[in-house]
Amino acid sequence: MSLSRRLFLTSGAAAMATPLQAQEAGFPSKPITIVVGSSSGGGVETEARIISEAMVKQGRPPLIVELRPGAMGSAGATAVYRAKPDGYTLLFSPASPMVFNQLTHKNLTYDPAKMTPVILVGDQPLVLVARGDLPADSLADLVAYARKNPGRTFYSSPGIGGGNHMSVLLLAKHTGMDVKHVPFPGAAPATQALLRGEVDFGIISATTLLPWYKEGKLKFFAMGAKERYREAPDVPTFRELGYPEEFVLTAWRVLVGPPDMPAPIVERLNRIINQAFEDPVARERYKTLGLEFRGGSAQEVADMLKREAATWERVARENKIEKE
């Protein structure tokens, strides 16, 4: 190749790289909109505001939290999916918009697989919980009880096709339990059914159940975390009890953007959020909500989302979950 040809290619490549490099170097130069697919006052909104305040302490522009409730988070996900991929519009998402909605809805107006993963912000463990008077004191006891009472052991969840429901389906398949689902319109009524003894067990966010667990009104049998939960250190994890990796069951939060976001912007956002949570105040405030900041790279959260999608697609297929 001639010298002039090499110089032309080099200068052309540099010219192409310059806009992205310049964009990355000055990013963010204005507030970033964080879309939350829930109503005002919800936990996810509070979590997003903690991130915003931590970023302001770093001297960066604040986040603008925009609420887009509706359709199990699909309304907010669709808005971000259609946004300009410049890093200034992101979705702060729990599992439903990114994993479970596609398993229960025929015509989503966005494609979760095409969204751009930015960071795993945090998670909290789900717990296998039973009513306080259930004649069982461990996961093994619960399995034995359900086998002795096939079709007469009931579990609650906040709705069909969500993470809580699917987690019990995974457990039932693994253990051979024949249990019956009683869906409720939300976590609160599903929990109240447990407290009233109307159902026998469920797999629900541990944080919301702690007061009743500590009072002895509910029993915890297994945590869906990689390590024991600091608020209930006597409760073993599923992994400790010999269950496979897919029984790391958590309620997680991710930041994702529209399809085709430039890699330099993704890396910049990822670095900014990781740095924001170096602030011990932000970490502690996050813990008060029952969450642990996770962080890590954009590739790590991309890999996690692929694993989650594959696991729950299989569970939905095995249990013939129908799309509506």
Image (spheres, grey):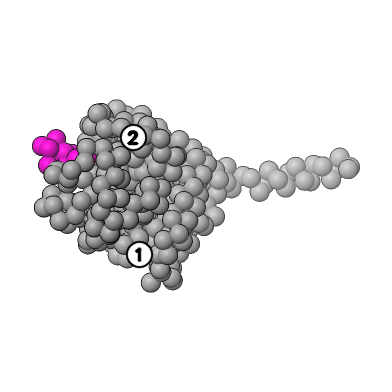
Residue in the foreground of this view, choosing between 247 and 250: 247
* x, y percent for residue 298: 49, 42
In the figure, is residue 110 to the left or right of 181?
Answer: right
Residue lying at 30% horizontally and 50% vertically, measured from the top left: 147
Mark 2, secondary structure of its residue: loop
- Asked if the residues shown at circle 1 and circle 2 are in contact, with their CB atoms under 8 angstroms apart, the answer is no
Q: Mark 2 points at which residue?
A: 237
Under mark 1, the amino acid is: Ala
Residue 220 drawn in magenta: yes
Query: Which residue, as the protein is rendered here, is positioned at the far front?
Result: 148
- Vertically, is 32 above or below 111? above
Q: Quadrant of the N terminus?
A: top right
Q: What stretch is highlighted in magenta?
A: 209-221
Q: How crowded is mark 1: few (under 14 residues within 10 Å), some or many (20 or more)?
A: many
Q: Which of marks 1 and 2 is nearer the N terminus?
A: 1
Residue 100 bears which disc, if any?
Answer: none
Residue lying at 25% horizontally and 61% vertically, measured from the top left: 183
Residue lying at 34% horizontally and 52% vertically, measured from the top left: 177
Q: Mark 1 points at which residue?
A: 75
Q: In which quarter of the image is residue 263?
A: top right
